[in-house]
Image (tube, rainbow, N blue to C red):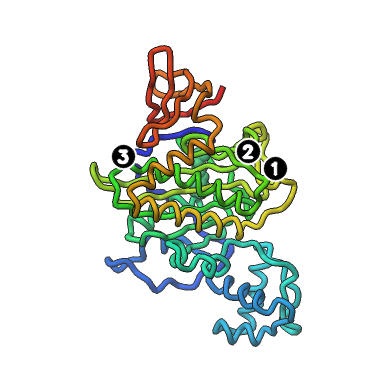
Amino acid sequence: MAEFDSVAAIAVSRAILHNSRIKQPTSKRKSRAGTPAPHQLAAQTDARLGQVVRLLIAHATVVVSGTKIAAEIGTSRSEVWRLVQQLRDLGVDIAGHPSTGYSLKSMPDLLLPDMLAPQLSGTLFGKHIHHYYKIGSTNTVAVEAANAGAPEGSVFLAEQQTAGRGRGANQWHSERSTGIYCSVLLRPALPPSDVLVITLAAGLAVHSAVQEVDRRVLPDLKWPNDVLIEGKKFCGILTEMNAEVTRVRYVVVGIGINVNQSSFPADLQAIATSLRLVTGTEWSRVELCTALLKSLDREYRSLVENPDAANSILRRFQERSSSVRGRQVEVEENAGLEGVTEGLDSRGFLQVRTAQGVRTVLSGTVKLK
Ligand code: BTN
């Protein structure tokens, strides 16, 4: 789970698992060739679920009749009942039934577009948010969407991943509705050699989002794309790129954050943690995900608009990492190397002083000793 692959061009294409539990409205949008684009074939969460939740939140103190909900979202009362049952399956606490009307018992914490979009308006990530109840991997669906022409700023979120991918051949443990499994699609006008800085910026965005929600938590960035607390990993970033030699076509940045997990499988217990395990309290995924996307928007905009932003990202990354300087490491790269970290070079690659001199780490797993 904790290794780094070079940010070399990768365009993966995998079978996308369908959302088996939520009936989907038929998609009207087609690709230019007349067949649905690949990401449209993956079953997104029924958008009406978000509309029902929004309505119930807007009338949080009262019971809302099935007739009113049906009229507002343009469907029948029996369909509203079916949607309410689906929301309950997703863990939303709704009281009532068709004859009495419905009310929310507690604030739902689902990453539905209707919950996120209003808070993200004006950012790059507010307009094209795709949500899946269950999917193989949000990175895979984002890559498929990118190949089919999806716009920059598209966001892909899942409650659960059945084939969450980490770097190399690693998997990402993606238990239902406990973590944030998020991929964003970017189309930067940058050469491929500059893409590592985007990954570092994503780490910084996670760092600030966590601090914004709870100042007491101090994340530690581990080059290039792990985020740790007290030596254990709670966030991993998988950046995948499709590029020509001099020009990036797109970048997918996949971010996995362990938020409310109360335990991990035995093989992860020694190395993984969650924000809940660290603080002893339940976190709002909606709040954290909103803060993350806002922060990523700020970092990314300044990177593409301001020539000095890359230097600022490198400086801040080094300030927020306890291991990027002066730390004994072992890197499983090519023949492998061992030495003491000496900061980042101007493109963001890790420098390590070895017995043979200073080496630049381009890829591989960095093990802290
Ligand atoms: C790593 O630490 O090896 C990277 C883990 C990245 C996991 C995220 S979860 C959202 C996105 N979808 C995936 O399949 N992987 C990334």
Give above or below for 305 relative to 115. above
Q: Amino acid at mark 1?
A: Val
Q: Quadrant of the N terminus?
A: top right
Q: Is residue 266 visible?
A: yes
Mark 2 packing: few (<14 Cα in 10 Å), some, or many (20+)?
some
Q: Amino acid at mark 2?
A: Ile
Which residue is at a point 45% across and 63% down the rendered structure image?
123
Which residue is at a point 53% across and 71% down the rendered structure image?
47
Q: Earlier in the sequence, mark 1 or mark 3?
A: 3
Which residue is at a point 54% across and 48% down the rendered structure image?
206
Residue contact between numbered discs 3 and 2, judged by CB atoms under 8 Å: no
Q: Secondary structure at mark 3?
A: helix
Residue 27 figure quarter? bottom left
Q: Position of residue 149 (x, y in %)?
A: 32, 60
Q: Distance between the Cα atoms at labels 1 and 2?
A: 8 Å
Q: Quadrant of the C terminus?
A: top right
The answer to whether the residue bearing label 3 lies less than 8 angstroms from the nearest atom of ligand 1 is no
Which residue is at a point 42% across and 12% down the rendered structure image?
355
Residue identifier under label 2: 229
Residue contact between numbered discs 1 and 2, judged by CB atoms under 8 Å: yes
Q: Which mark is residue 278?
A: 1
Residue identifier under label 3: 193
Q: Secondary structure at mark 2?
A: strand
Residue 23 figure quarter? bottom right
Q: Residue furthest top?
A: 355
